[in-house]
Amino acid sequence: MEKFRGVDYYGFDELLTEEQRMMRDAVRDWVEAKFNPIVSQHHRDGTFPMELARDLGEMGVFGATLKGYGCAGLDNVAYGLIMQELERGDSGLRSFASVQSGLVMYPIYSYGSDAQKERWLPRLQSGAALGCFGLTEPDTGSDAANLRTRATKVDGGWSISGITIIQSGTPFSVFDAQAGSAFISPGDAPPVTASLADGATIGSAYTHGDIHQRLNGYINFANFQHAPLLNYPSGVCTDLTGNTCVTAFGNLGRNTYRGPYQQNWDFSLLKNLRLTERFGLRFTTDFFNIWNHANFANPALTDIGAGAGFGKIFSTTGTPRLIQFSLRLAF
């Protein structure tokens, strides 16, 4: 297969320095030769070629804009070109390199002590050490300054404490089994979506209040209407199953709505015991769904032709309350 040479419709290459072009071409050739031949199999296996980290280090990809500690000291344009070529191979490859550079090496370079810089930056640049970055939490989103999760060094290892995660509900659709009769016969295909009533919005469909008081009406039937009639003779059309009364499709999308949120509070107790200089014992107790919250399922009937059962919640879902004990010997 012919080697990829890139496209340049606007004469962008003419604006680049020799160093910028050289770095871009070196990474492009590496992606072609070393990464593209193996990426498909790794995608099927759900794996990542960690062995290529050393190659990226040797090319100066990790910490490319930093100065000293073995880093290349390139400008931001060269760094952008590097990321572009890695992204062409696979978005995961580009993320792997940009997290190592921007979210691991840069904070150490800018805010770390001299000892931390000397210890970690050369190893991270070469690919001998790989960093990771824990970021998003429910209370703060992508806000590193307000993270509540902490890692604390204890006798014999590290203890990590965090917070529970409250998840939004699973998506569901509001259907109209009569919709689209101008194009598909009833029963020939799954029901298609309904339409919003005049003046209604997607958000106005939800009822409000405590979920325990909304089980008989999680969403409001009056927020929806049948799909519009496509054509009919003069007079009122009352028989949607007849040949003279057919409808178009509804205007709602699939999975527009979300069911009740789910919450499970898990809690762990951990005790480290130092037996000897070489041996340690760790005892852990994990409590899953400790408060035994009832997590409600989505409404069972979401076809607007379902009658009185429309929008009602009939069942619960989620995990049971569990307690798990574990004992680990470290040596």
Image (cartoon, helix red, strand yellow):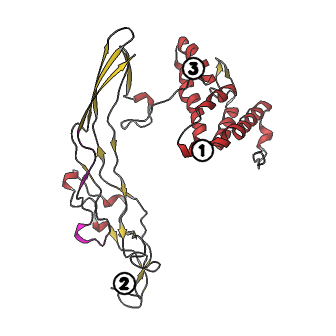
Location of residue 261 in the rendering, given as x and y in whole percent from the top left corner? 30, 48
Sequence order check: which comes first, mark 1 or mark 3?
A: 1
Identify the residue under disc 3: 109
C-alpha distance separating marks 1 and 3: 36 Å
Residue type indicated by callout 2:
Thr
Residue 275 in view in this figure? yes
Give left or right: position of 242 versus 40: left
Vertical comparison of 21 with 105: above or below: below
C-alpha distance separating marks 1 and 2: 51 Å
Q: Residue at x 37, y 15 (%)?
A: 156
The magenta-colored residue range is: 304-321
Location of residue 76 in the rendering, given as x and y in whole percent from the top left corner? 67, 31
Q: Is residue 225 magenta?
A: no
In the rendering, which numbered label is found on residue 241? 2
Identify the residue under disc 1: 41
Q: Main secondary structure of the magenta part?
A: loop
